[in-house]
Amino acid sequence: MHSAGALRGISAKVERFCRDRRGIAAIEFAFIVPVLLIMYFITMEASQAIETSKKVSRIGSMVADLVTQQQTVVKANLDAIMKIGGTTLLPYNRSAPSIIITAIQMSDEATPTVNVVWSRKLVGNTYSADAKPGDTTTVPSTLRIRNTFLIRVESDLGYKPIITWSASNSQGLGLTSAFSNISMSETYYLRPRRSPTIPCGDC
């Protein structure tokens, strides 16, 4: 008798437990929250990456525009212009862009050669020359016009997603390094605005 009563009591408790719905919301919430957080971070990171990519393109166009407005330049001018270009990325500051300015001269021939006149680059916080004067380079076929002068600006950024970045440059959240440095780059060509060429006095 006691055994049967105990079994009925246990059965009743199990039945009440199965009918109890008070904990379902908490359990569902525990399952849904991680998914919602992942979706939020992916959306946030994607929008920031797109905006940063636009800014990398803006660096090239802005630097090229400023250089081609000059009639002559010196290294200090070019360095200042590249520094201004780098600030375009703010408030993004997880990595620094590299910027290369190259002055290019096409020879006065039916099939013109394409040579570097001068160059200047910014990598991190270091300014230096890039290609040597007289080096052969390339331009798109549509711009390869005899006896013309071009300014080429290349902007490049190793974009670091916020979900993989830390101030100490250590890997975060266990994500693979394949996503820790996404390459973003752009190249712009412009012709001088106020003179046929733009010489650099000390490049």
Image: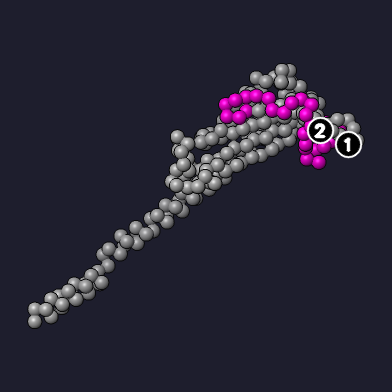
Looking at the rendered image, the quarter that the N terminus falls into is: bottom left
Question: Viewer-proximal residue, 21 or 161?
Answer: 161
Corner quadrant of residue 108: top right
Q: Nearer the viewer, residue 118 or 7?
A: 7
Judge whether residue 133 is colored magenta. Answer: yes
Quadrant holding the C terminus: top right
- Image coordinates of residue 170 in percent, x first then y, are 46, 38
Find residue 111 and name its label.
Answer: 1
Residue 120 in picture, x, y percent from top left: 68, 26
Q: Is residue 36 left or right of residue 103?
A: left
Q: Specify whether residue 51 is in view.
A: no
Residue that numbered label 2 is attached to: 114
Q: How many marks?
A: 2
* Residue at far right of view: 110
Point out residue 160 in the picture as x, y percentages from the top left corner.
Answer: 52, 40
Q: Residue furthest left?
A: 1
Range shown magenta:
122-148
In the displayed structure image, the side of residue 157 where residue 197 appears, left or right: right
- Comparing 27 with 1, the one in front is 1
Gap in angstroms between the C-alphas marked 1 and 2: 10 Å
Q: Residue at x 8, y 78 (%)?
A: 2
**Residue at image x 26%, y 64%?**
22
**Circle 2 — which element?**
strand
- When the figure is inspected, residue 62 is found, relative to residue 164, above or below; the finding is above
Measured from the top left, where is residue 19 in percent x and y?
A: 25, 72
- Element type at mark 1: loop
Rendered image: mark on residue 172: none
On whether residue 21 falls in the magenta region, the answer is no
* Residue 27 visible within the image: yes
Q: Does the residue at mark 1 contact the one at mark 2 (Cβ under 8 Å)?
A: no
Residue in the image at 39% along x and 58% along y:
32
